[in-house]
Image (cartoon, helix red, strand yellow):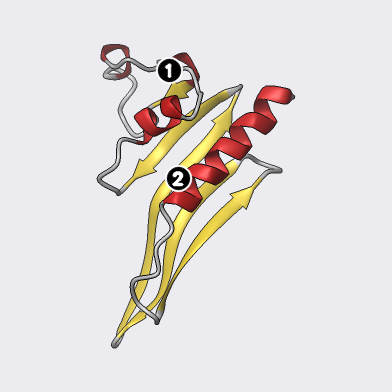
């Protein structure tokens, strides 16, 4: 349980570090679901007549590992997690197909 709480705190810190408020009509939100261990950084709002909704980062914790499900930033989220103390063996690049995961420095699942 201690590792789970540590990973939740690391994820919260990582998502907060990516928050931005560039436009007044677009809100950047952190979605933090500790019951199901789903975590997202989304933008919602309006740009003129266009509706804005985008999920930039989506992380899950499954079976003790952090899964990177979506990364629409230019940042290397895996490396940022490692720098915050998460072992590479506890990170899964869920956004890559399973056959590619063995060729990364991270866990396959």
Q: Quadrant of residue 69?
A: top left
Judged from the image, the secondary structure of the residue bearing numbered disc 2 is: strand
- The residue that disc 1 covers is 88
The residue closer to the viewer here, 53 or 16, is 16
Give the residue drawn at x 57%, y 32%.
Answer: 61
Q: Quadrant of the N terminus?
A: top right
Extreme residue toward the right, this view: 1
| Coordinates of residue 36 in the picture (x, y in percent) | 66, 41
Q: Nearer the viewer, mark 2 or mark 1?
A: 1
| Coordinates of residue 83 in the picture (x, y in percent) | 42, 27
Judged from the image, the secondary structure of the residue bearing numbered disc 1 is: helix
- The residue that disc 2 covers is 58
Extreme residue toward the bottom, this view: 49
| Coordinates of residue 71 in the picture (x, y in percent) | 34, 43
Disc 2 versus disc 1: distance between alpha carbons?
18 Å
Give the residue drawn at x 43%, y 70%.
Answer: 44
Give the residue drawn at x 42%, y 35%.
Answer: 68
Give the residue drawn at x 51%, y 24%.
Answer: 85
The correct choice, above or below, for 63 with respect to 72 in the image is above
Q: Quadrant of residue 12?
A: top right
């Amino acid at each position: 349980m201690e590792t789970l709480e540590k990973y939740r705190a690391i994820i919260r810190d990582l998502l907060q570090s990516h928050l931005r408020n560039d436009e007044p009509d677009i809100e950047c939100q952190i979605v933090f679901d500790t019951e199901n261990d789903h975590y997202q950084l989304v933008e919602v709002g309006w740009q003129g007549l266009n509706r804005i909704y985008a999920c930039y980062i989506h992380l899950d914790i499954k079976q003790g590992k952090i899964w990177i499900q979506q990364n629409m930033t230019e940042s290397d989220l895996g490396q940022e997690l490692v720098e915050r103390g998460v072992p590479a063996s506890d990170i899964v690049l869920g956004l890559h197909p399973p056959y590619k995961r063995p060729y990364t420095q991270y866990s396959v699942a």
